[in-house]
Image: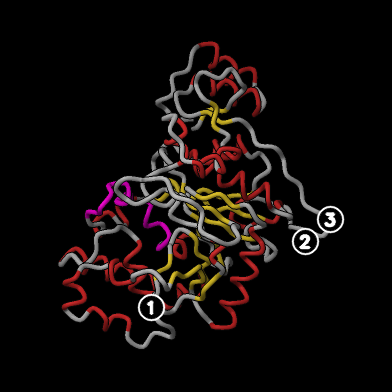
Amino acid sequence: MPSSLPLSPFLLFFFFFASPTDAVFSSLLAAAGDGPRFTEAPHFRNGVHCPSISAGAGRAAACDPSYVHIAMTLDAHYLRGSIAAVHSILKHSSCPDTLFFHFFAPAGGRVGGSTVRSVFPALRFEVYPFRAELVSGLISSSVRVALQNPLNYVRAYLADVIDSCVQRVVYLDSDVIVVDDVRRLWDDAAARLDSAAAVVAAPEYCHANFTRYFAPTFWAEGGAQAFAGRRHRPCYFNTGVMVMDLHRWRAGGYRRRIERWMEVQRERRIYELGSLPPFLLVFAGEVEGLEHRWNQHGLGGDNLTGECRRLHPGPVSLMHWSGKGKPWDRLDAGNPCPVDQLWKPYDLYVRPSSGASSIAAT
């Protein structure tokens, strides 16, 4: 329990003497806490065809090869999005008990596993504290302040933290909703990564103007040489949805490769965005492409105005509110975009005016 949370004598009595159940204690926290509150999600069960999972919890249990591994961040402002994303994944999973989540939260912060456990009591997960100093000295200013958050760079450090027994992980940003079985993404990416001995699989967008993600001076000074010898034509891909082979990541020293480009950026500015360009510099032309249905991105508009946008043509398995506009902010402001209504059914946030039973974020 955070030391900053004041407890009345009544709560202290229950804590030390009455030994309340988790449910009772959660309701007490909801009454006393000042964080966002969430209602408990429904319990989703495996289908009859699902593989059995070994008993246990924590990092040791994560080594079971039947798991689909998913990595996300837990940030104070984006917590509501993370909770909605997990809810959507569970709802559409045919085998929800075979999902293992790896959450990364700021070290020393209040956003952690107790909220996740209260909202999703049966969820299999581990929370890892991420120390900002690991990357803060490498972060340069960005077109949007939010992109300078150290948690945006967690995706480059997954292989250093997640247990070495885990070969692959699906990395997802907090502003996504999955409306398909995530195991389909997992299986498709695994087949593609295995066939090409590649490190990253993600939807690619080769029609996008790749050059605009870097400064004109970068290209003028021979930046194209950075992509020489790639297996494919370098194309834009969005790092908010990736399947990563952690074994090959470690063996290839890819964290250090990304850090080197961040060091170059600090010396001479070669891009304006946050954690995306270093990934492009290292992986563009080496990515195994997945169907676009797995990242209908840009629903948050651009990085400056966050204007409303429509879904792309074609099938949809994952919606991604990349850009400035987040659905929870626009809904709370009473000015949602039409596409935000597709996010709303997965929102478990309990507004302060509501009298519903809720769980406080701690």
Q: Is residue 236 magenta?
A: no
Location of residue 269 by image quarter: bottom left
In the rendered image of this protein, does residue 191 appear above or below residue 98?
below
At label 2, counting other C-alpha atoms closer than 10 Å, the crowd grade (few under 14, some 14-19, many 20 or more) is few
Which residue is the site of mark 3? 48
Tag 2–tag 1 contact (CB < 8 Å): no
In the rendered image, the residue lying farthest to the top is: 9
Q: Which residue is mark 2?
A: 51
In the image, residue 275 sits, relative to residue 25, either above or below, namely below
Q: CA distance from mark 3 to mark 1?
A: 43 Å
Q: Earlier in the sequence, mark 3 or mark 1?
A: 3
Q: Amino acid at mark 2?
A: Pro
Instruction: Tell me, yes or no, if residue 71 can be seen here.
Output: yes
Judged left or right of residue 352, residue 275 is left
Q: Nearer the viewer, mark 3 or mark 1?
A: 1
Viewer-closest of 319 and 338: 338
Q: CA distance from mark 2 to mark 3?
A: 9 Å
Q: Main secondary structure of the magenta part?
A: helix
Q: Is residue 81 left or right of residue 315?
A: left
The secondary structure type at the circle numbered 2 is: loop
Taking 360 as reference, is 258 above or below it? below
Q: Is residue 318 above or below residue 91?
A: below
Pointer 2 or 1: first along the chain: 2
Q: Amino acid at mark 3?
A: Val
Return the x and y of residue 32 as percentages of the image width and height. 50, 19
The disc label shown at residue 234, or none = 1
Regarding mark 1 in the picture, which secondary structure is present there?
A: loop
Q: Position of residue 17 (x, y in %)?
A: 61, 17
**Residue 73 bears which disc, if any?**
none
Which segment is the magenta one? 141-156
Q: Residue furthest right?
A: 48
